[in-house]
Image (cartoon, grey):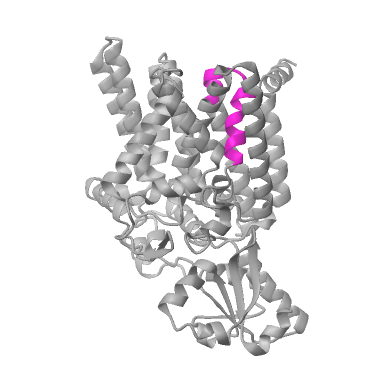
Amino acid sequence: MKLLKRSGAFIKKHVCIVAFSVVYLALSFLLYKDFGATYDEKVEYDAGKYFSAYLSTPTTLENTDKLINNRSENIKYYHQLPLFSTYSRVYPALLNILNPSFYFEWFHLQNLILGLFLFIFSYAILYLIYGDGSRAVVGPILLFLTPVVTGHIPANPKDIPFATIFLFGIFLISYFLKNPKSKSVEILMLGVVFGIAQSTRVVGFSLFATYFLLSLFQTVSKKERVAETLLNSTIILMLSFFIWVLSVPFLGANFLANLIYIVTETAGFQTWNHEILYMGKFLSKEERPWHYLPVLLSIQIPLTILFSLASGVFLVIRKKLRYNISHPVFVITTIVLINFIIYFALRPVIYNGIRHFLYLAVSLVVLASFFLIDLYDSLKREHKFILWGAVSAYLLFTLIRMLRLHPYEYVYYNEFIGGLRGANKKFELDYWGAAYKESALRVLGVVKQNSIKDLKVYACDNQFAVVYYSQFQYELVGRSRDADIIICDTFKEQLREKTEDAAYQTTFPVVFEIKREGTPIHVVRARQRFSVLFD
């Protein structure tokens, strides 16, 4: 009876996030089959499966030899192997345990369900300050209506889990700076969460850096014992390294040398050497300009977020808004500044829009939520109505755009660039390759309808997805010249025009296009004799 009363009181207190969660989960179960397998999914899930097997097998000479020389055919790259992987594969390993049949649709449902924590943590950060669910739910709503984030949740088992644990780290830093009571709990929780974040992405170390700087500043300003703060921070750091070693066997094999390698490899990413489409030009990773990330953030985040950030910064400069060191605004601002310093100093390899910096986009959305709420509270009554109406109208407009983009919400570009039309041929659109599912199914429909045998299909990228959705009714070939059908995203299509013989454009006319907002993001080409079948 007491449990029911407590549950009822909790739901009443947090009814807004409970309602949000119910709607989100309902949408997840309704839509999870819509999303296609993306580029790195199979690699990640295979690596997770191999990590599970590794944990149950002793690292003997015999097993290590098998690991290197007789690896499973499913393991395509050495960096999938636990002893060679430079980041944690714990998350995909957990997904494999829950999905032994390896159905991508189930993986997508799992990602969606676990993605709910991203919104819950954003709510928790805001509730920590306002103690009001109706205000705290602004964070999850703004985050959900940030298409470049939401669109990655179903089929991105790397960047979204990291963004989630990163946001949880921000919450814990804010909470313990505000409530420095139980130091043992603080050390344990921060050490574990920081370790998980660092093992997932090296830049997760910025959480510890932020905590250390702010806690030290807080100690000095209150004239408390600095030595105790330094000791506690050292213990947290050592604990985080311990969790990191447990999650990444490669690091544990030779800690100091491999730690240096992981840091340098993350910045340079020597194994990746492809073209980046930026402002209409194809650039190598060395040619990518310093303003790549700021520009992409400014055109892939909704204008509501940018407006709130600009307004908040202006009011802080004018001293209309004030935040103390333990306030999440101060914490997030410090983290954002540290990450931009790292970006400008190390110039790490970055591609696929802002995919590698989704955690930073999430942090900016939460920061914008604080600014928007505080801006609303600072206005007079008549101005509050204007702000509420303008923001609501734009959010509704963004929701409509998301419905039209579905299931490719992550290809969103805001009104600064003119949406997809303005970004077309200037920036990558379907950089994550989710649309290969729809094209593969379109070809499959033609094959079944016309009882075609031995059709040969060439996929510019994401070949596994095409095979997965082909139901083995047509053959995938490795060269476009051998194909009857060519399936290509518009990025690779544009690249082929510049790097290969463009004669295929006349011999393989476009027979099918996937469009969003009137802009092609994927094309299917066919030889002349097959083109009539797509009418």
Q: Name the quarter where the N terminus is drawn.
A: top right
The kind of secondary structure the magenta stretch mainly shows is helix
Q: Residue at x 30, y 42 (%)?
A: 342
Q: Position of residue 106 (x, y in %)?
A: 64, 54
Residue 139 magenta:
yes
Regarding residue 242, the answer to whether it shows in the image is no
Task: Name the residue at the bottom extreme.
Answer: 529
Q: Residue at x 64, y 61 (%)?
A: 518
Q: Position of residue 195 (x, y in %)?
A: 38, 37
Locate residue 192 relative to residue 129 in the image: left or right.
Answer: left
Choose between 119 and 52: the one closer to the eye. Answer: 119
Q: Residue at x 65, y 19 (%)?
A: 382
Locate residue 376 relative to residue 174 in the image: left or right.
Answer: right
As drawn, 464 above or below 482 = above
Q: Position of residue 440 (x, y in %)?
A: 64, 71
Q: Residue at x 71, y 36 (%)?
A: 22
- Extent of the magenta region: 126-145
Residue 194 magenta:
no
The picture quadrant where one finds residue 338 is top left
Q: Name the quarter where the C terminus is drawn.
A: bottom right
